Image (tube, rainbow, N blue to C red):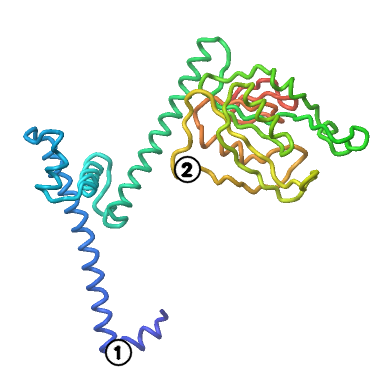
Amino acid sequence: MSAALIADTSGSNRLAVLASEIREAHDDVSRASDYSAERAVDAGRALVEAWSDETIPRGQWRAWVEGVAGLPWSTAKRYKSLYIAVSTQGLTIADIAKAGQIGALKAVKTAEKGTRRAEREAELAERTLEAARALGSARYGVIYADPPWRFEPYSRETGMDRAADNHYPTMTIEALRALDVPAADDCVLFMWATVPMLPEALAVMDAWGFSYRSHCVWLKDRFGTGYWFRNQHELLLVGTRGDVPAPAPGEQYASVIEAELGPHSAKPGHFAEMIEELFPTAPRLEMFARAPRLGWDVWGNEACPMAHRA
């Protein structure tokens, strides 16, 4: 509101009264929210204390809460969780008043899951390093692969003008399946697959010892070629072996990522950065790399063979 309009309305007795009522009501709401949060935590404290009293047999705890204390079971559990979160996890009365009881607990649980996920990622890194030390050779908890798929056109006489073979050496499916991939027992694989080679990519993933989990889509800024459709996307498949933590709730990336198309077969750096954020400490290998990448071991025709992480 402009200063002139404020001046015009400030002389109205009725508006002045209404403004005062609004402020007073808002202050009451804030005080009520704080008081409600405080009392919920107080109820949780009393519930925790009652729980520790061995006078109540464990099998009769719910009956006591509902029949004697007069609380619905779900409400009692929420109060108890709020008290524990305030006592041990840094939740504040202001947090509860602002987000509400359920919203505040959801935030705490989300933070817990994020912390636990980070711990599991660090455990993955340590297990991978221990396995490498025991075997005397490098083993990786994260592998990022862009295989040089050999796609057979309808005719090698007339359909090779835009084939990958014209840009870089390709490999047969048999050769790709036979590769000895230095994956640890617990490892996640991010592997690029072109649309027509999806069945072959899944077969290679299986041959390397990974189970398919999910994929994301690279949406390109222009169309390419294709028999059924003019392809404007590529797939980044995700497979795992052993015990690998998925992203924590709320930390997942979108399944469709838009990025510009670069030189033939080159992938946007955004995807490697995404993997680094998801797995910041686990040893990482980029297979079929074009160049060294900071923080990774790389292997490929265009990069230093097995160049070690910086």
Against 19, is 195 above or below? above
Is the residue marked by circle 1 packed among few (<14), some (14-19), or many (20+) residues within 10 Å?
few
Q: Describe the element under mark 2 as helix, strand or loop.
A: loop
Disc 1/disc 2 C-alpha distance (Å): 52 Å
Residue 309 in the figure: left or right of residue 99: right
Quadrant where the C terminus lies?
top right
Dividing the picture into quarters, in which one does residue 209 lie? Answer: top right
Quadrant where the N terminus lies?
bottom left
Could you say which is closer to the camera, residue 306 or residue 255?
255
Disc ID at residue 251 = 2
Q: Amino acid at mark 2?
A: Glu
Q: Amino acid at mark 1?
A: Gly
Residue 33 in the figure: left or right of residue 116: left
Measured as percent of width and height from the top left, residue 19 is found at 28, 79
Against 10, is 205 above or below? above
Measured as percent of width and height from the top left, residue 210 is found at 58, 25
Q: Describe the element under mark 1 as helix, strand or loop.
A: loop
Dividing the picture into quarters, in which one does residue 81 lie? Answer: top left
Give me the residue at 89% from left, 32% from top. 156
Residue farthest to the right, as pictured: 157
* Count of numbered marks: 2
Give me the residue at 74% from left, 43% from top. 262
Against 37, is 152 above or below? above
Measured as percent of width and height from the top left, residue 9 is found at 34, 87
